[in-house]
Amino acid sequence: MYKSFVLCIASVLLISCQNKSETDSKEVKKDSHSFSDPLRAVVKHLELDITVDFEQQLIYGKAEWTIENKSKTDVIVFDTRQLNIEKVTLGDDSTEAKFTLGQDVKYLGRSLTVSIEHSTTKVSIWYSTSKDAAALQWLNPQQTAGKVHPFLFTQSQAILARTWIPCQDSPGIRFTYNSKVTVPKQLLALMSAENPQKKSADGSYQFRQPQAIPSYLMALTVGDIVFKKVDRRTGVYAEPSMVNKAVWEFTDMGKMVDAAERIYGPYQWGRYDVMVLPPSFPFGGMENPMLTFATPTIIAGDRSLVSLIAHELAHSWSGNLVTNATWNDFWLNEGFTTYFERRIVEAVYGKDEANMQDVLGRRDLNTTIEDLGSLNPDTRLKTDFTNRDPDEGVSDIAYEKGYAFLRTIEEAVGRAKFDLFLRGYFDNHKFQSTTTEEFLAYLDENLLKADTQLKNKIQIDNWVYQPGVPSNIPNTIAEKFDLIDSLIKNWNTTKNPIGLNRKIVSTNQKLYFISNLSKSTTANDMALLDKEFGFTKSGNAEIQCAWYTQAVTCQYEAAFAATEKFLMTVGRRKFLTPLYGEMAKTQDGKKWAKEIYLKARPNYHSVSYNTIDGILK
């Protein structure tokens, strides 16, 4: 029995070593959005020791990198942007190293080239951020819910980690990290790592991330933050006045984690917690490992917008566990995650809810294709953002076209078979970064198996490498929307809204109704609908955005004050872009938009204001 036990342990260790060796030896691809050359020398672990200075609005300290000098080269290259590099040393004895900073390149910043020895395993960089560091959002007390303490959060995706940490800023390069962060003692610091649940006495915090992650998942937030648990492994961080609302809103988080595990295997990150940030956060959510950042705009008071949590949770598999190797492969993160999100929603809330989200997503995809043009190369899944900011890739193409491609495969082979395939894909590629071509090769070998008829049915090349949407896109029917179609038809004929609010109830139903209003809708029509539904006074940000955009189109002036207030208080780019875009279509509207933007811009993160700058230029 003892002998059998020993043999069993030996086998497990052998398999473990083989898996580790396969992961470590996987060749990292050169990334056009990074100055680094991981084939020559690559980072493996980070020891970060930083201080957060709210008075100067700076972060300063030391990034100590453990490196692997694969080719015995005499240099290692890091990415920096808007950083002040003070000195660089090598090894434990801190021998001062020669370094040079390259010319500033738009979007990419400046290369930091450090001279090293063939035997060098440690490079330490002393640095500070600049006040305009693009990843950092410094909020004064008035911009927070509590109005007493300042607040800081980071947004590293896509290539903004280099604006607060000197790093090899590519999604194909993964590393573990430990961190010491010093902040004002009345504030709590959190990172994309194992986190404290209470404030320290002296403002000093230690963090550990034992799993290898790419730089875009580095995250830090500091503020007057408290924690409350949801269940044994999920919880919510937020400002004190927000935390109870958030816990109530996210009460199903534990159920979502359980549902996700039943579909695609164990959750690999320990805890799953959500940090509810102030309104200036530019995205709905950011999937930082162990600590999703979320916008307060999903707290609607009726749990109607929590599918966003399902989306960010799904990233714990597709994105964080298996990552796009370059930003040209972005759909591997977002298409898979959108597919997995709807599977979680279906498991927790039912197929009707998932189908409604599918139909709304298809509408968004069609709008994006129409706006970009069906022949635009940016409507391909495999994109090319060389010499461009990869943040331009954040569109419904990666999300919804990627989702539709995976649905196409599911329908071709059957859900049970596709689930088994995806479970194997996640298991075999965990804690690795991969390319589109590597995924397609794995798909061919492990699912399609040279079945020419099946390949022709799926039309892989059309989905991945061609613009537009292939003709074999799956069709989803949402029966509850069929009813609304008949109600809209009746409304267009009678202009009588009485009773509609009893038949059009859920958030998705209301969004579908608003989005399908006739182009001939007048301001008077809007007033009648507003009296029936109270859309202008809605507390649901999704409905507000849809309604206010329609109000701008129809010149429904009764909603203009609420529209301005919305733009002044919400920083989520998803909401800002359609509103400012619609306003900019007329001369008077653009003038009004610029007046609001002049006041609102200081409340927006750089991710948002860079987009709006382009709309209103």
Image (cartoon, grey):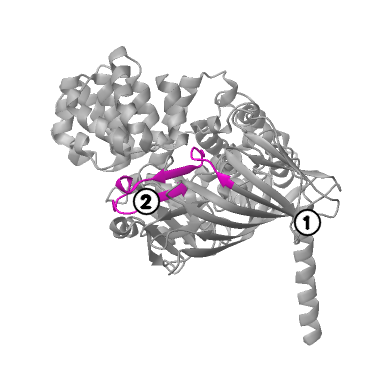
Quarter of the image containing the N terminus? bottom right
Residue sitting at 38 percent across and 62 percent down?
186
Q: Is residue 485 visible?
A: no
Q: Nearer the viewer, residue 233 or 617?
A: 617
Query: x, y (%) of residue 592?
Result: 28, 21
Query: x, y (%) of residue 526?
Result: 19, 25
Q: Residue furthest bottom?
A: 1
| Mark 2 neighbour class, 10 Å CA radius: few under 14, some 14 to 19, many 20 or more | some
Which kind of residue does numbered mark 2 sit on? Answer: Pro
Query: Looking at the rendered structure, which numbered label has been put on residue 121?
Result: 1
Snapshot quadrant of residue 602: top left
Q: Is residue 456 above or below residue 332?
A: above
From the viewer's perspective, tell me whether residue 94 is left or right of residue 596: right
- For label 1, the SS is loop
Query: Looking at the rendered structure, which numbered label has been put on residue 150?
Result: 2
Q: Residue 357 lies in magenta, yes or no?
A: no
How far apart are the two marked residues, 1 and 2, measured between alpha carbons? 38 Å
Magenta highlight range:
128-153
Query: x, y (%) of residue 600?
Result: 33, 32
Q: Is residue 538 above or below residue 245?
A: above
Which kind of residue does numbered mark 1 sit on? Answer: Thr
Residue sitting at 42 percent across and 22 percent down?
615
From the viewer's perspective, tell me whether residue 244 is left or right of residue 152: left
From the viewer's perspective, tell me whether residue 315 is left or right of residue 615: right
Query: x, y (%) of residue 15?
Result: 77, 65
Residue sitting at 47 percent across and 66 percent down?
196
Q: Nearer the viewer, residue 612 or 454?
A: 612
Q: Nearer the viewer, residue 303 or 140?
A: 140
Snapshot quadrant of residue 10: bottom right
| Mark 1 neighbour class, 10 Å CA radius: few under 14, some 14 to 19, many 20 or more | some
